[in-house]
Image (tube, rainbow, N blue to C red):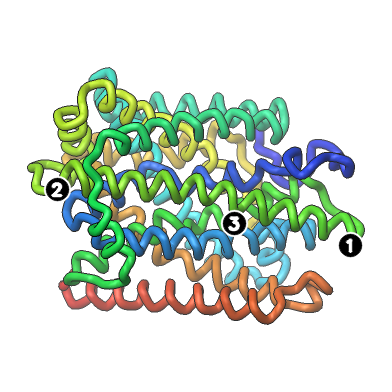
Amino acid sequence: MSLQVEVPERSPNRRAGRLGLLGPAFVAAIAYVDPGNVAANLTAGAEYGYLLLWVLVAANAMAVIVQYLSAKLGLVTGQSLPEVLGGRLRTWPRRLFWLQAELVAAATDVAEVIGGALALYLLFGVPLPLGGLIVGIISMLLLQVQSARGQRPFEFVVLGLLGVITVGFLAGLFFSPLDGAGMLAGLVPRFEGAQTILLSAGMLGATVMPHAIYLHSALARDRHGSGHSPSHLKRLLSATRWDVTLSLILAGGVNVAMLLLAAASLPGVAGTDTIEGAHAAITSALGPTIGVIFALGLLASGLASTSVGCYAGATIMSGLLRVRIPMIARRAITLIPALILLATDIDPTWALVLSQVLLSVGIPFALIPLARLTEDRALMGPFRNRLPLRTATWIVVGLIVALNLLLIGLTWTGQA
């Protein structure tokens, strides 16, 4: 069995209402509420209160632009971002680009499997290595839905898991003593030491995720097909803007809720720098029911995001290397690093946060080509980015690259 990512399952229904055109962005949005987000956001809220709330708000605004551009590229060109790059790069640059993209996808997968394993441990006491294996097997079954039934049923499965994630991470917020003044202060951009910069980079990497940038172009193309007339393409792009905006409002709201929950209920509580400790503190402060709902949200997050991450890895490989491998083999290979980490004494939560920092470093490699390609008149024709969007895009690129350079500098000097 191999995952097909480039052939649409059927011709698009041109009479479908706007609601019927929604879906691909919600699958990509799973990347924005994965276990890496949980670790980064809970750590930020528990250790620094509302200080880094602005990072989530800014990152989510950036993500709306980025994900729209990715979907737009797929719809206009009929190719995914990896396919476009694969057709333009020479052999060795293409292979090196694939290597860094694959490493980013692997870091994503490690975070997702670890998160799912932690959830099974919290809910049922399952040992972490066994939990990671269970998460990997279930993700294979979820991917089988996409291979056997097509993209639309896969979207419905992912949307169902997204609903569980939303309830799981929002429930505790209704029982938390939020500080309105603290939240307003948290919207003012500022840092307090090198550690907050490192954590901010992790939060950024967990929000604007490279593998989601690569994947969304394929999701939009596969769902809606290619070769559209200019008028129909305008309609699809309009629906895509709604798709991206609504999905990321939901995902952004979940991320903000996690930070607010930690800031309101977990500051000063010992052990809240780990997901296990945060779960114990949430259970103690808000009751066992909220604790179980939180763990269920974490489990749904791990299961959904590892399936989407594997889909993204297949998109990257098929586009840049023009190679497809059986999904069972791919799932087994990408599962190995996570299982090794789970079998060691490494703190799983810290491994999650560090994986998000690696993702943050990988963002420019996906984002800069996307920005350049979507403003290319020869490639995009009349749908190339106009001046306001080009300006906003390069501002986003500049901010992300600047934060990553600062992070690398602090790490190099030993301050992070």
How far across and how far down the image is residue 148, in percent?
70, 26
Structural crowding at the residue carrying mark 3, measured as other residues with C-alpha within 10 Å and reported as few (<14), some (14–19) or many (≥20) = many
SS at circle 2: loop
Residue 394 in the figure: left or right of residue 334: right
Pointer 1 residue: 230
**Residue at point 17%, 71% (across, down):** 193
Mark 3 — residue?
214
The one of 206 and 293 positioned closer to us in this rendering: 293
Quarter of the image where one finds residue 233: bottom right
- Residue 316 appears in the picture as rendered: no
Considering only order in the chain, which callout, 3 or 2, is on the residue closer to the N terminus? 3
Which numbered disc, 2 or 3, marks the residue closer to the eye?
2
The disc placed on residue 55 is none
Instruction: Give the secondary structure at mark 1.
Output: helix
Is 314 or 322 nearer to us in this picture? 314
Query: Of the residues shown, which amino acid type is indicated by label 1?
Result: Pro
From the top left corner, tell me how far across and down residue 110 is, in percent: 37, 44
Q: Which one is closest to the eye, mark 1 or mark 3?
A: 1
Dot 1 or dot 3, earlier in sequence: 3
CA distance for labels 2 and 3: 37 Å
Provide the residue designation for mark 2. Answer: 267
Nearest the viewer among 50 and 320 is 50
169 or 31: nearer the eye? Answer: 169
Residue depicted at x 31% and y 71% = 189
Q: Earlier in the sequence, mark 2 or mark 1?
A: 1
**Dot 2 amino acid type:** Pro
Percent x, y of residue 142: 56, 28
Q: Residue furthest front?
A: 180
Q: Tell me the quarter of the image containing the N terminus.
A: top right
